[in-house]
């Protein structure tokens, strides 16, 4: 059966909505840092009308769970919960960092992506991802918020060439120059719902959904230490 998933994200300056119907994606996005609450619901209406479906006909509702702007993440999850509750849909929370990895693959075919979102306060939200043969993304590091200088001290070089994604690379360009990774410049600055929905498709297939009342954001401010995931040494 073809998946039917609506995704939305307001976690960064970019506001985006996407609807997956089988292999077809209907998407809207706009960089508008202070207009998310005005834009997101009209975008939802547009993609539903374009596809000719209603919320009640969908299988799940996905959202960018963070990390990102505290206010933006809260807006996104609040709107997603309202829509899912009204249509009795399960929810899927997708990492905004992983979504940028998927975006890098969509735009340039990158399979190893290093993501860094400007977290303000001289820190970045950090995560690295490697694409698997089945299209899923494997987290190489645990997602965290960390000063660039500390990150440079802890990340070791490896055999891969990493595509850079996110606003953190430019925001802390000087501080990130010491990072011991072979890197390529990328075109992805923000997470996008059309990439969130692709990750959500895999999660839905594995039954990784939660009820509306159990959906939650991920801020990372309580996870300040970079850590290599077990088995990735």
Image (cartoon, rainbow, N blue to C red):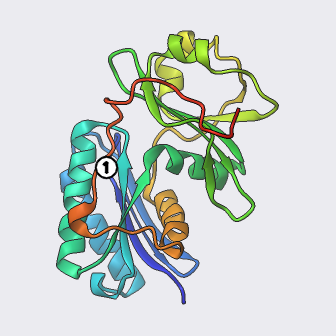
Q: Residue at x 54, y 18 (%)?
A: 151
Marker count (numbered)? 1
Q: Is residue 153 above or below residue 157?
A: above
Q: Residue pushed farthest right?
A: 159
Q: Is residue 186 above or below residue 6?
A: above
Q: Is residue 170 left or right of residue 104?
A: left
Quarter of the rendering occupied by the N terminus: bottom right
Q: Residue at x 21, y 40 (%)?
A: 71
**Is residue 15 in view?**
no
Mark 1 burial class by Cα count in 10 Å: few <14, some 14-19, many 20+:
many
Quarter of the rendering occupied by the C terminus: top right
Rendering coords of residue 150 (x, y %): 51, 13
Q: Is residue 199 above or below residue 189?
A: below
Q: Residue pushed farthest front?
A: 230
Rendering coords of residue 57 (x, y %): 34, 88
Which quarter of the figure has residue 88?
Answer: bottom left
Q: Is residue 13 left or right of residue 207?
A: left
Q: Residue at x 55, y 9 (%)?
A: 174
**Is residue 171 in view?**
yes
Q: Which residue is mark 1?
A: 10
Rendering coords of residue 199 (x, y %): 53, 61
Rendering coords of residue 177 (x, y %): 63, 13
Label 1 secondary element: loop
Q: Residue at x 52, y 48 (%)?
A: 98
**210 or 103, which lies in front?**
210
């Amino acid at each position: 059966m073809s998946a039917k998933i609506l995704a939305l994200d307001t976690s960064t300056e970019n506001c985006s909505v996407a609807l997956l119907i089988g292999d077809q994606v209907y998407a809207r996005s706009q960089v508008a840092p202070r207009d998310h609450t005005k834009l997101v619901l009209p975008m939802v209406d547009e993609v539903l009308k374009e596809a000719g479906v209603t919320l009640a006909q969908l299988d799940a509702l996905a959202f960018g769970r963070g990390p990102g702007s505290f206010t933006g993440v809260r807006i996104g999850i609040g709107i997603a919960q309202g829509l899912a509750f009204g249509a009795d849909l399960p929810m899927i929370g997708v990492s905004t960092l992983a979504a940028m990895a998927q975006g890098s693959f969509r735009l340039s075919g990158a399979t190893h992506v290093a993501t860094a979102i400007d977290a303000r306060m001289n820190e970045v939200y950090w995560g690295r991802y490697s694409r698997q043969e089945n299209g899923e993304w494997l987290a190489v590091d645990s997602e965290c918020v960390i000063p660039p200088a500390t990150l440079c001290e802890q990340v070791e070089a490896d055999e891969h060439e990493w595509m850079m994604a996110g606003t953190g690379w430019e925001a802390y360009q000087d501080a990130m120059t010491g990072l011991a990774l072979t890197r390529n410049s990328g075109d992805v600055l923000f997470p996008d719902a059309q990439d969130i929905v692709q990750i959500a498709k895999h999660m839905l297939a594995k039954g990784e959904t939660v009820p509306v009342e159990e959906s939650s954001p991920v801020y990372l401010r309580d996870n300040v230490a970079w850590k290599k995931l077990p088995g990735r040494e």
